[in-house]
């Protein structure tokens, strides 16, 4: 396994692989790899001939300089993990290389970025789309692997790929959780022991929402309210948003029917944690789905 830092070298390696007929699977990450990332890597290793992952803390998608600078990084550990999973290359460009000054282009994906995380962080998804497009342009993978953990990101990247005719297959994989239900996240490292012990409240509140719908509730405001009640029982968990949206458009809905996404973001001290659940709701029945698509 090689760590590649130069854009031109990465471009050449990927282009040579393609010329040889080798299929490339690509997993974009911010690093600090955990079981969630590893599930994507394993799928890529299974489906593609060679797997490239990027470890790039994309400053354009951070709205606070502090969060960007303090984002956990451990390249030695990440490289060991990636190697043992069968990754061929880690692409790890510097921020200055990716965004040389002046940098004047950005990608806006409309509508699907408005609700949920886009409401509080309007710049965030522009940074995600721009960063992902640059990585795709450098690597030109055949397949790319994303996690349901960040559903809005997956939807907007898929939309961008369609709108801009990128010929890349996207594979979306389910959220990987710890035994107590907390979704793996690099930001979990920010939690103290006490904060960590209350973090499963995110998943528990989603389970409460799911149970209400199972029992027949079809008003999204009522379900959101109950989710908020559960979260508010822990004063150190500060709600950023609780939203129930249509799974296709990611726009908020009043009546629960069809494929919906229950999503939330909660700030626990330094860590902003997100979680979600996908539900298929018919008139009298409801079932949970592993991913949005
Ligand atoms: P990140 O490094 O946080 O930007 O995540 C890189 C990719 O890993 C994204 O597609 C995430 O959705 C995915 N991912 C992160 N955490 C998890 C998880 N717990 N389960 C599944 N996928 C995840």
Image (spheres, helix red, strand yellow):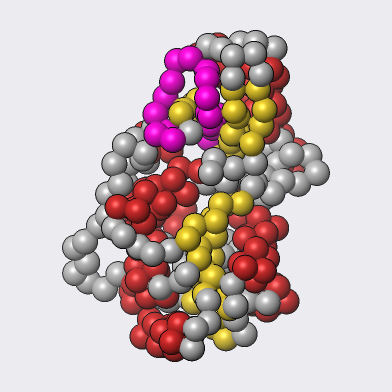
Quadrant of residue 235 in the image? top right
Residue 116 placed where, x, y %?
Answer: 43, 33
Task: Tell me if I can see residue 150 in this picture.
Answer: yes
Image quarter (top left, top right, bottom left or bottom right) of the N terminus = bottom right
Residue at the image position 41 percent from the left and 51 percent from the top: 158
Q: Which residues are magenta?
A: 248-266
Task: Tell me if I can see residue 78 in this picture.
Answer: no
Seen from the viewer's position, the closer of residues 238 and 153 is 153
Seen from the viewer's position, the closer of residues 37 and 199 is 37
Task: From the viewer's perspective, tell me whether residue 97 is left or right of residue 278.
Answer: left
Q: Is residue 77 above or below residue 194?
A: below
Task: From the viewer's perspective, tell me whether residue 265 is left or right of residue 254.
Answer: right
Residue at the image position 65 percent from the left and 63 percent from the top: 43
Residue 101 placed where, x, y %?
Answer: 22, 71
Q: Is residue 250 magenta?
A: yes
Residue at the image position 48 percent from the left and 14 percent from the top: 255
């Amino acid at each position: 396994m090689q760590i590649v830092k130069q854009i031109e070298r990465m471009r050449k390696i990927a282009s040579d692989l393609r010329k040889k007929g080798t299929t490339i699977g690509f997993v974009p990450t911010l690093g600090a790899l955990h079981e969630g990332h590893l599930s994507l890597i394993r799928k890529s290793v299974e489906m593609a001939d060679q797997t490239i992952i990027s470890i790039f803390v994309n400053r354009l998608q951070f709205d606070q300089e502090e969060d960007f600078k303090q984002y956990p990084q451990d390249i030695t550990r990440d490289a060991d993990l990636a190697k043992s999973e069968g990754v061929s290359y880690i692409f790890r460009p510097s921020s200055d290389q990716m965004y040389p000054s002046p940098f004047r282009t950005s990608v806006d994906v409309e509508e699907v970025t408005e609700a949920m995380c886009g409401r509080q962080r309007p710049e965030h998804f522009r940074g995600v789309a721009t960063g992902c497009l640059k990585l795709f342009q450098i690597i030109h993978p055949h397949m790319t692997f994303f996690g349901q953990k960040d559903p809005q990101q997956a939807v907007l990247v898929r939309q961008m790929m369609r709108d801009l005719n990128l010929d890349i297959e996207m594979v979306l994989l389910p959220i990987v959780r710890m035994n107590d239900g907390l979704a793996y996240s690099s930001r979990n490292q920010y939690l103290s022991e006490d904060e960590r012990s209350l973090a499963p409240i995110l998943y528990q509140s989603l389970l409460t929402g799911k149970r209400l719908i199972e029992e027949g509730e079809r008003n999204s405001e009522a379900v959101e309210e109950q989710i908020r009640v559960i979260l508010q029982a822990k004063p150190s968990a500060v709600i950023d948003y609780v939203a129930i949206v249509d799974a296709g458009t990611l726009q908020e809905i009043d009546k629960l029917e069809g494929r919906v996404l229950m999503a939330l973001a909660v700030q626990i001290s330094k860590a902003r944690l997100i979680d979600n659940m996908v539900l298929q709701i018919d008139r009298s029945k409801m079932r949970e789905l592993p991913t949005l698509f």
